[in-house]
Image (cartoon, rainbow, N blue to C red):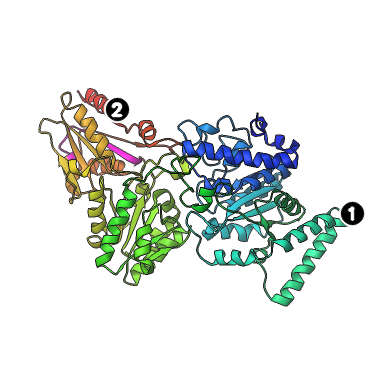
């Protein structure tokens, strides 16, 4: 039996010798590679924090001490060390364990994390709560240098640095987020990486002095204050983290288990917040993950021996990128912005062909929106490509920095609707409810690649204000060859014998056609497909008012969604029939698209049941 199989609680790791811990690190790496090759998930980021996580669990006592993982996708090693080994093969599967920290899943997960740059703020709050309640224990935030491109990280650092709480921030510096990092912090960290030998000597001396009875810790603090004063006198500057009030330790080798243990021991002996700068390599211990960390950041599955991944297929992201490249050939005003998601949003080719018109701003969605609004104000035609779940972070900038001035920008909202595997924090079901409440916003929701191309041109050239084109992850469910794409805001498929109208939009149109087809001999049905979902076309409201029953299926949030808005407009027209909306009411858990559709009652079988029940109620 392996060492890993015998670890049932975090305290079990403390009984292992140093040699056994090194063997454990090898076992952890292999377990992650074997599992993720089947379930898919985040590989390279987890392989990069193996020694760091083992060191954390040897030097701290969970759950009295707490870890907050930034983004959270690098928590697999932590999960394996906290009693979830037997469940690990269910990673990111329906009903299985999450690929992100979830307090509801384990008391050793202290905070939900799925979006970037939140860890320092959350850890600051947890540490302050311990002080208020008189509880002992440290709080450790693990944040990558990629997450340091997000403004919230600095808001947290500025406030946490003023405290005197037992707070340690581990800066996991691997020079990557998903794509290569950009900006000042990347250059600053490169400068700080220059002296690991000095740091090792300093850490060892600090540990030695701190353990001198009675006078050790006061003497250590005095030496630190003197060192900072001398350094500032000679160099007139200091590390940016020290200027924020933190004690800075590092850089240390994040893959040297002994170095990490010593550094953490030193951090615990300092009576104020500490930034521990650890240098790591994404994919450490796995050659193909090291060579292509972006490919194996989030991967659907692969051959564990060779690293070979399934061949990519057409998808909406690629269709978007291809279309944008063609449009940019003829229009030099088109420029594109992404927030550390060049590959994921299908913009790799655009970034290569038009480098002067392509901008990766890092994990900074709020900045991205205000930046594109500035580009628009300067006469450019900007497109911001962003996942639906991450666009939520820029609501204020959409409203106050763009809509108020009626600047013309295009938001290409990728991963709209149900998103497989990553769970609650990554679902794209809230963009429509919040975007549709903002003035000067037009929203398109294509069902096919051909409609995506049409809608993108309409958003760029036929629309004023904020134009949104939203599309799902993955491929089209409705082949263009079997369906004529819409140039119009909506299409009405009328059955003259029907008293029931089914309304929908986006990829759910494919499910709707299947359900209506299955019921053809049983219940005559008409279909209304929206392509421009906001503002809702007035003629679509008039047509719906002619039917005795109207059923709206929506792959998005029910509260504030298009279905709810459609019903309100019908009511204003004194609609006399039966109207109902079937959409998503709760956070969607980790699941496949198919399972998510079923949970939400939006799969073909559920639609058929819903339509039958509605027909029975009226008859």
Prevailing secondary structure of the magenta residues: strand
Question: Residue 180 at what x, y percent from top left?
Answer: 49, 59
Residue 484 is left or right of residue 373, and the answer is left
Whether residue 436 can be seen here: no
- Is the residue 138 above or below the residue 550 in the image? below
**Nearer to us in this view, 431 or 43:** 43
Which residue is at 36% across, 43% downward?
417
Q: Is 108 on the left or on the right of 434, as rendered?
A: right
- Give the Cα separation between the discs numbered 2 and 1: 73 Å
- Tell me what residue is drawn at x 40 percent, y 61 percent: 369
Tell how many labels.
2
Please provide percent x and percent y for residue 408.
Answer: 31, 64
Task: Give the structural element (helix, strand or loop) at label 2.
Answer: helix
Q: Which residue is mark 1?
A: 214
- Left/right placement of residue 172 relative to residue 494 reads right
Please, what secondary structure does the residue beneath circle 1 have?
loop
The residue located at (56%, 34%) in the rendering is: 105
Residue 125 colored magenta? no
Mark 2 surroundings within 10 Å by alpha-carbon count, few (fewer than 14), some (14 through 19), many (20 or more): some
The stretch of residues the image draws in magenta is 544-556
Residue neighbourhood size for the residue with mark 1, other residues' Cα within 10 Å, grouped as few (<14), some (14–19), many (≥20): few
Q: Which residue is mark 2?
A: 605
Residue visible at 75% across and 52% down? 262
Q: Which mark is residue 79?
A: none
Residue 182 or residue 489, whichever sits in front: 182
């Amino acid at each position: 039996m392996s060492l890993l199989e015998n670890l049932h609680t975090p305290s079990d790791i403390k009984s292992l010798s140093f040699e056994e811990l090194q063997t454990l690190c090898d076992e952890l790496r292999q377990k992650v590679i074997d599992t993720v090759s089947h379930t898919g998930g985040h590989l390279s980021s987890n392989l990069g924090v193996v020694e760091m996580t083992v060191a954390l669990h040897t030097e701290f006592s969970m759950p009295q001490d707490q870890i907050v993982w930034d983004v959270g996708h690098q928590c697999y090693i932590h999960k394996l060390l906290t009693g979830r080994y037997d469940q690990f093969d269910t990673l990111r599967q329906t009903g299985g364990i999450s690929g992100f920290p979830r307090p509801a899943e384990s008391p050793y997960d202290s905070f939900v994390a799925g979006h970037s740059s939140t860890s320092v703020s959350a850890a600051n709050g947890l540490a302050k709560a311990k002080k208020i309640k008189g509880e002992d224990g440290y709080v450790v935030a693990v944040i990558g240098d990629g997450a340091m491109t997000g403004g919230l990280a600095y808001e947290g650092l500025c406030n946490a640095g003023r405290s005197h709480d037992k707070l340690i921030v581990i800066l996991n510096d691997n020079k990557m987020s998903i794509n290569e990092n950009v900006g000042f912090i990347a250059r600053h960290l490169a400068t700080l990486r220059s002296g690991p030998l000095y740091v090792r000597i300093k850490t060892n001396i600090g540990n030695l002095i701190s353990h001198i009875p009675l006078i050790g810790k006061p003497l250590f603090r005095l030496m630190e204050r003197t060192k900072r004063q001398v350094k500032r006198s000679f160099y007139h500057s200091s590390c940016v983290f020290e200027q924020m009030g933190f004690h800075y330790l590092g850089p240390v080798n994040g893959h040297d288990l002994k170095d990490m243990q010593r550094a953490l021991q030193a951090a615990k002996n300092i009576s104020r917040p500490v930034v521990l700068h650890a240098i790591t390599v994404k994919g450490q211990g796995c050659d193909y993950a090291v060579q292509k960390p972006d490919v194996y950041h989030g991967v659907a599955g692969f051959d564990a021996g060779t690293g070979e991944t399934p061949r990519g297929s057409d998808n909406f992201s690629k269709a978007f990128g291809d279309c944008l490249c063609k449009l940019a050939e003829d229009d030099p005003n088109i420029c594109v912005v992404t927030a550390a998601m060049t590959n994921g949003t299908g913009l790799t080719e655009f970034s290569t062909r038009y480098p002067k018109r392509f901008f990766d701003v890092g994990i900074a969605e709020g900045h991205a929106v205000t930046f594109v609004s500035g580009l628009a104000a300067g006469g450019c035609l900007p497109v911001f490509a962003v996942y639906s779940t991450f666009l939520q972070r820029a609501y204020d900038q959409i409203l106050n920095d763009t809509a108020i001035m009626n600047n013309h920008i295009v938001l290409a909202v990728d991963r709209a609707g149900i998103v497989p595997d990553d769970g609650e924090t990554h679902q794209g079901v809230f963009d429509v409810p919040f975007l549709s409440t903002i003035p000067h916003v037009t929203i398109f929701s294509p069902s096919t690649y051909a409609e995506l191309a049409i809608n993108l041109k309409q958003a760029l050239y036929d629309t004023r204000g904020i134009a949104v084109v939203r599309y799902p992850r993955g491929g089209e469910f409705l082949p263009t060859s079997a369906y004529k794409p819409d140039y119009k805001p909506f299409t009405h498929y009328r059955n003259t014998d029907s008293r029931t109208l089914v309304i929908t939009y986006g990829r759910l149109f494919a499910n709707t056609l299947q359900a209506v087809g299955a019921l053809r001999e049983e219940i005559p049905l008409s279909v209304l497909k929206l392509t421009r979902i906001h503002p809702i076309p007035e003629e679509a409201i008039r047509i719906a008012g002619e039917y005795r029953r109207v059923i709206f299926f929506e792959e998005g949030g029910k509260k504030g969604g298009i279905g709810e808005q459609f019903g309100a407009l019908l009511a204003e027209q004194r609609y006399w029939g039966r109207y109902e909306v079937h959409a998503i009411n709760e956070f969607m858990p980790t699941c496949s698209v198919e399972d998510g559709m079923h949970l939400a009652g939006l799969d073909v079988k559920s639609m058929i049941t819903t339509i039958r029940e509605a027909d029975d109620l009226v008859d």
